[in-house]
Image (cartoon, grey):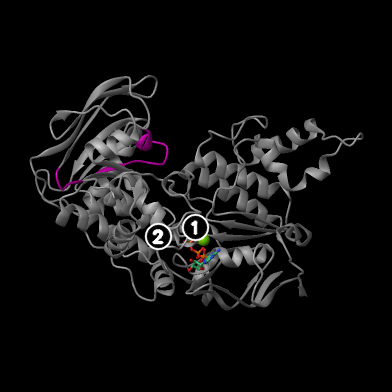
Amino acid sequence: MLEARNVTREFPGVKALDDVSVRFEKGEVHALMGENGAGKSTLMKIITGIYRPDAGAVYVDGEKAALRSYSDSAKYDISIVHQEIQVIPESSVAENIVLDKLGQFRGPLGGLDWKRINDTAQRYLDMVELDVKPTDAIGRMTAAQKQLIQIAKALSSDARYILMDEPTSSLTQYEAQNLFRIIRRLKAEDRCVIFVSHKIEEVLEICDRVTVLRDGRVIGTRDVADIDRDELVRMMIGRSENIEHLGRLDISDEVVLEARHIGRGGMFEDMGLKLHRGEILGLYGLVGAGRTEFARLLVGADRRDTGDILIKGQPAKIDCLRDAVEKYGLGYVTENRKEEGLILPFNVRDNMVLPILRKLRDKPFHISPRRCKDVTREMIGRMNVKAPSQETRVESLSGGNQQKVSIGKWLAAGCDILIIDEPTVGVDVGAKRQIHELIWDLAKNEGKSIILISSDMTEMITLARRILVFKNYKIVSEIDHLNDREYSYAEVSERIGAAMT
Ligand SMILES: Nc1ncnc2c1ncn2[C@@H]1O[C@H](COP(=O)(O)OP(=O)(O)OP(=O)(O)O)[C@@H](O)[C@H]1O
Ligand SMILES: [Mg+2]
């Protein structure tokens, strides 16, 4: 078995882990849960030798493990699927999968045996049911495909302990179910899977035991069979969650954005929508239903073949994202904030002011540092971003706080129409609530108009009064909480469910 004993690890200004002891046993799927910043990833990185603990140690089968760097983890039969997608875009699928053990693929003359590399990669691609070729380049693959490649990579080492840090965050339900089948098989082979997730339903479905961390401390380890949703939430945030039904904003008559007859060859045909001032309009659907692709056409990130976009009644000429932001005040908060939305090695301030640098000049060719600081201070306050300082690198913030920075930068840019794509994926229950309140407040009290893309039914019904249901790149239904009468939460969710089938 694999054990962390009395592990403590500090980063400047934060004790990420405080005397943490957990035991992971063979033949179990062990969930690790906790709010953003609770210390889950830090613990995973200590177990794989990426970080060294300040105190305490990792034990494998009762022996203290000498984990000096990541490359030592293989010796102890440990492999990891990282939370951040870590693939090398310029290389092939197979190269990424066998990366850590290229040495095993030397041919008789010392060169690499490419046939064996590709065959090996193919075997693990089959396992995760990913339909790409080992020789394909990774560059333009989707987040889900990259995620599956990382999983294939972790499986390819045939390790006994497999750590998965939020492996399903960009997978569709179908792909997640396939991953669960793989996890069940690993368990049957008496291996151990450590499964980090924010999704309570997943944990209840797939895991045997769950350990909850809060502020770097272990709150407890429980058998999943003996625990329910409410108790788990209480362990994570220290109180009960209460879901309020909000989605009932009055909708003004003023249309701020209208899309008509939008088409793109082979993808969309004759799509349209209207967004009113101060409205939160929901685009609901499963991952892969075409909502992000549609949003990208609206903001000019991709080209449309047909159709018009009107902003405040006037035809808009949007050829790129910059047009959308600068000419029309239309911002797009992307779904994969780590890849597109933020520049992770940059600090909070640089991320915040990047889209508006030109507005922050105090004289030609000179950007005013003071104005950068002022704008950032205002946004940090308004969005309630928890960061030690403006100079903190965004990559060291928790997921929820990263998301607030990526919404904040478009507000700083003066956008009054925002498309917000899956704002709470990978965000814990506490931060999720803050983001919901933020979105609600922007619409209700600041008159911002928001298109919210989400696959989270509760989030959708809580926030959006009108909901467009997407399925296979089409809008199959429009649901309004207050259409002819007031619908209850259950009725709205039932109607969404019916539209999806
Ligand atoms: N490299 C680092 N430098 C500085 N601080 C860090 C670093 N890595 C993590 N932290 C801090 O340590 C704490 C724990 O972070 P960690 O990434 O382990 O949380 P997590 O539970 O994985 O959160 P999430 O659910 O958002 O992934 C946070 O306060 C985080 O800001
Ligand atoms: Mg994490």
Q: Assess mark 1: CB under 8 A from ligand 1?
A: yes
Q: Earlier in the sequence, mark 2 or mark 1?
A: 1
Q: Residues within 10 Å of mark 1 (few under 14, many from 20)?
A: some
- Residue tagged by mark 1? 395
Task: Give how far across and how far down residue 183 sits, in percent.
Answer: 61, 52
Q: Which mark is residue 150?
A: none
Amino acid type, residue under disc 2 in the picture: Gly
Q: Is residue 446 visible?
A: yes
Determine whether the residue tagged by mark 1 lies in a helix, strand or loop. helix
Residue interval drawn in magenta? 277-293
How far apart are the two marked residues, 2 and 1, measured between alpha carbons? 12 Å
Amino acid type, residue under disc 1 in the picture: Glu
Determine whether the residue tagged by mark 2 lies in a helix, strand or loop. helix
Q: Which mark is residue 400?
A: 2
Task: Give how far across and how far down residue 353 sits, in percent.
Answer: 35, 51
Question: Image height check: is 397 above or below 21?
Answer: above
Image quadrant where residue 111 sits: top right
Point out the residue furthest to the right here: 108
- Name the residue located 25 percent from the left edge and 51 percent from the top edge: 461
- Name the residue located 73 percent from the left edge and 50 percent from the top edge: 157
Q: Assess mark 2: CB under 8 A from ligand 1?
A: yes
Q: Quarter holding the C terminus?
A: top left
Residue 147 sits inside the magenta stretch: no
Image quadrant where residue 88 sits: top right
Viewer-side residue, 458 vs 336: 336
Q: Is residue 208 visible?
A: no
Q: Quarter holding the N terminus?
A: bottom right
Task: Give the total of numbered labels.
Answer: 2
Question: Image height check: is 62 above or below 424?
Answer: below
Q: Nearer the viewer, mark 2 or mark 1?
A: 1
